[in-house]
Image: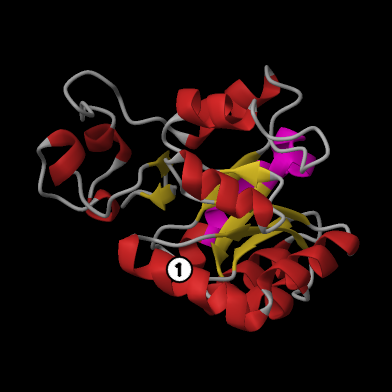
Amino acid sequence: DIRITADGELVLFHDEDARRAAGCSRRIGDMNWGEVRRLRVFGGHGVPHLKDALEFMALWPSGDIYFDLRGGGRRLVEALVRAIAPSGLWRRCFILDFYSKRRSLLHARSLDSRVNLSVMPGGPWNIAPSAHLAGVQSLCLGWGGPITRALYKAASFFYGARSAVARVKAMGISVSAGVVNTPEDIRYLLSQGACGIWTDDLILARRTLANVPSNGPSPR
């Protein structure tokens, strides 16, 4: 999750404000970097800057990083593209947003043709349209909570999500899914064709993936 501060710096932060994570009611977008860097997340951790992420990626040559756009509009998109361009990490960097917000993704692509786009379709009915956006290299499927989870599963059956995912993968587009934190949900998304899982519980996910049949998907 990436946001832009009032003075144009890029930071990795999920929430719009710092109340839940750092006890500060101010919005990240209203603070400058000097103020944000003094925050202590859950009492002990600083807020990482984009530069921290890129430096880490340079030391981890097998990893990819997905930048989930959080507010900021075109200003955020343009700052992110400018920041990644000189890093030499384009191949492993993905700019991520919902299909419903695809204008931000297409704007990023218009700024630099090297941009890799990753799309969250939202509903299963958007899987095919998401895959056909210019520059899309990855889809991230899933739901946002218990209610949308039930709706997603019902819609997946109705819209033939498993077949749609197979067609997307045949196009050379990678498919991951989440965020899921139970063995049942992990196994369900793998059964739908996901080859990567987004999770908050790495230990549980690895334990679950270790029991995936050898003739099944090859997840990460």
Residue at screen point 49% across, 39% down: 183
Amino acid type assigned to the residue bearing label 1 in the image: Gly
198 lies left or right of 46: right
- Asked if 169 appears above or below 42 in the picture, the reply is below
Residue 44 appears in the rendering: yes
As rendered, which of 193 and 143 lies closer to the eye? 193
Q: Position of residue 35 (x, y in %)?
A: 22, 36
Residue at screen point 74% across, 36% down: 89
Q: Where is residue 137 in the image (x, y as percent from the top left)?
A: 77, 57
- Check if residue 4 falls in the magenta segment: no
Residue 81 appears in the rendering: no
150 lies left or right of 120: left
199 lies left or right of 41: right
- Residue count near mark 1 (Cα–Cα under 10 Å), binned few <14, some 14–19, many ≥20: some
- Provide the residue designation for mark 1: 73
Q: Where is residue 8 in the image (x, y as percent from the top left)?
A: 41, 50
Residue at screen point 46% across, 46% down: 180
71 lies left or right of 30: right
Looking at the rendered image, the quarter that the C terminus falls into is: top right
- Secondary structure beneath dot 1 equals helix
Q: What stretch is highlighted in magenta?
A: 77-93
As rendered, which of 124 and 76 lies closer to the eye? 124
Q: Where is residue 12 in the image (x, y as percent from the top left)?
A: 42, 40
- Check if residue 86 falls in the magenta segment: yes
Location of residue 72 (image quadrant): bottom left
- Asked if 207 appears above or below 28 in the picture, the reply is above
State the predominant SS element of the stretch in magenta: helix
Residue at screen point 30% across, 24% down: 46
